């Protein structure tokens, strides 16, 4: 990434931010290069917003609340969201190509995700006119009721691993609730958010309702968090960053919701459909090149079938086709950056030093067609103890840690012995065990005899250090609404307490 205006004319160029319904140059004039993870080379140029750009985006969002958007009934907001969904669906092929070049995930995975995201926006549209209040029984002549009103201006701070999906999960409910939004995409993946702004514009949202300002987290992101006119921050990313946001945003007591890290346990009992369980476990261990908070990277296997699981993981790792994201034949693409690749390889060294057995992978891929990109082999450690760092810390790379257990209680103890609690998986044919174990796992989403099943109607979020609040489902609107209570006297009379 360069913080000067690159000179190359061969790159795709995006030189304007989207603020107040207009395409505007950054006030400081900076541009950045977006690096394609598959090649290690720049493929696009994007604008880099600073604090002054955040100021004008927040001002536009604040003004929009007092304009037509602030008076728009829910069914009209729903109609705009449906038009946005239609526009997204029509642009799936191009958006998938752009996002794949920006973050390196497989083109076919982006196509599938974007097609589903259109359904997400339709779901949020269906909620826009259902933010009902309640009536409160009081004494005769007094009437109490509540109304649910938008929290205000929302700062949506987006990660690099799934930019458009993260925008969908934050912006969809925020707009359904009647909020306005300033989107700050990660500096590593600025392009797809700017394309999303084109869809917003084409759908006909009033100026200022959605604003897009790519920028560096410590500058634009920090200023958005600290801004007195921002009422809420919705952030997906690291826990350390979330803690810093809480400190920096505390002066005006803004609202926060966080989707943070995970180190998900994927528990396989001996009575499971072992083929299906191992299919799921080997798929999810390396999906998205391990760059997701929800993948089952801690694979807990009952001891009587442990050696079989080790054998299958070793065989599957060798059969994964790591290749260019644009190829339909590829099973796994690159890591997002040189920095992330180095982090993953450092954890391979840590695992060895801690005494785990490296049974597959662990090296950078240097085949000629991939050598310039950030490709790493699917990696498996066996004989892992849950106290090891490779079992406790989020790596964000395709590294599976296989951990044996002896019985149900030990499986639960290992699964819950983590700072995180985002997702978990469980495989068993015993219905009673399925209920017992799933009810005791400290995670916000538990999958039984399946894994990584997400829909717009299923609330998603974490326990413990994995976050605050929920995305998806009816619950998704709650972080973007606040309750107003009104008490009304039908008589309008109020006695003078000093009359005597």
Image (cartoon, rainbow, N blue to C red):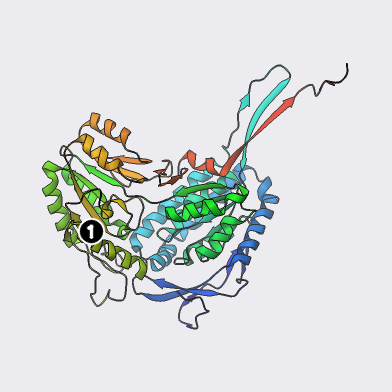
Residue ID at (41%, 58%): 162
Q: Position of residue 12 (x, y in %)?
A: 47, 75
Instruction: Please identify the quarter of the rendering in which residue 212 is found.
Output: bottom right
**Can residue 93 be seen in this snapshot?**
yes
429 horizontally vs 76: left or right: left
- According to the image, label 1 marks what residue? 351
Residue ID at (67%, 20%): 138
Instruction: Quarter of the image for the C terminus: give it.
Output: top right
Q: Position of residue 411 (x, y in %)?
A: 23, 39
Instruction: Quarter of the image for the N terminus: give it.
Output: bottom left
Instruction: Please identify the quarter of the rendering in which residue 445 is found.
Output: top left
Front residue of 224/36: it is 224
Which residue extends farthest right? 499
Instruction: Please identify the quarter of the rendering in which residue 338 is found.
Output: bottom left
291 horizontally vs 160: left or right: left
Residue ID at (30%, 43%): 417
Q: Position of residue 430 (x, y in %)?
A: 20, 32
Q: Position of residue 366 (x, y in %)?
A: 24, 74
Q: Residues within 10 Å of mark 1 (few under 14, many from 20)?
A: many
Above or below, comparing residue 236 to residue 365 in the picture: above
Above or below, comparing residue 382 to residue 499 in the picture: below
Name the secondary structure under disc 1: helix
Above or below, comparing residue 132 to residue 402 in the picture: above
**Total marks in image:** 1
Front residue of 250/430: it is 250
**Can residue 171 be seen in this snapshot?**
no
Residue ID at (24%, 54%): 400
């Amino acid at each position: 990434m360069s913080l000067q205006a690159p000179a190359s004319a061969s790159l795709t160029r995006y030189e304007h931010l989207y603020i107040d319904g207009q395409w505007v140059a950054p006030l400081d004039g900076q541009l950045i290069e977006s690096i394609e993870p598959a090649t290690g080379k720049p493929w696009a140029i994007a604008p880099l917003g600073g604090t002054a750009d955040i100021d004008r985006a927040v001002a536009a969002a604040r003004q929009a609340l007092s304009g037509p958007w602030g008076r728009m009934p829910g069914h009209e907001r729903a109609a705009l969201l449906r038009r946005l969904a239609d526009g997204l669906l029509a642009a799936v092929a191009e958006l998938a190509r752009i996002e794949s070049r920006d973050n390196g995930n497989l083109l076919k995975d982006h196509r599938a995700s974007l097609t589903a995201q259109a359904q997400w926006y339709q779901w949020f549209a269906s909620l826009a006119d259902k933010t009902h209040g309640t009536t409160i029984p009081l004494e005769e002549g007094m009437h109490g009721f509540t109304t649910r009103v938008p929290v205000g201006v929302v700062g949506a701070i987006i990660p690099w691993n799934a930019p458009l999906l993260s925008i969908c999960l934050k912006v969809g409910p925020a707009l359904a609730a009647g909020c306005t939004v300033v989107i700050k995409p990660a500096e590593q993946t600025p392009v797809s958010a700017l394309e999303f702004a084109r869809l917003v514009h084409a759908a006909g949202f009033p100026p200022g309702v959605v604003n897009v300002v790519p920028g560096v987290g410590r500058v634009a992101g920090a200023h958005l968090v600290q801004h007195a006119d921002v009422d809420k921050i919705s952030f997906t990313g690291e826990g350390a960053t979330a803690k810093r946001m809480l400190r920096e945003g505390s002066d005006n007591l803004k609202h926060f919701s966080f989707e943070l890290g995970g180190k998900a346990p994927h528990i396989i009992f001996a009575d499971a459909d072992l083929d299906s369980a191992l299919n799921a476990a080997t798929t999810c261990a390396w999906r998205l090149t391990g760059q997701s908070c929800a993948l089952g990277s801690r694979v807990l296997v009952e001891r009587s079938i442990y050696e079989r699981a080790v054998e299958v993981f070793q065989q599957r790792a060798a059969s994964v086709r790591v290749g260019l994201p644009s190829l339909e034949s590829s099973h796994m693409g690159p890591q997002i950056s040189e920095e992330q690749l180095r982090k993953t390889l450092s954890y391979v060294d840590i695992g060895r030093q801690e005494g785990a057995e490296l049974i597959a992978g662990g090296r950078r891929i240097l085949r000629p067609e991939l050598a310039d990109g950030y490709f790493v082999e699917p990696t498996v450690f066996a004989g892992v103890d849950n106290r090891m760092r490779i079992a406790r810390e989020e790596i964000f790379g395709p590294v599976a840690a296989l951990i044996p257990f002896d019985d149900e209680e030990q499986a639960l103890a290992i699964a819950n012995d983590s700072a995180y609690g985002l997702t978990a998986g469980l495989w068993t044919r015993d219905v009673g065990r399925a209920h017992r174990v799933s009810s005791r796992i400290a995670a916000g989403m538990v999958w039984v005899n399946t894994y990584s099943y997400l829909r717009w109607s299923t609330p998603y979020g974490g326990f413990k250090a994995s976050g605050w609040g929920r995305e998806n489902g009816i619950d998704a609107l709650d972080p973007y609404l606040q309750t107003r209570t009104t008490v009304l006297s039908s008589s309008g009379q109020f006695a003078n307490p000093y009359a005597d």
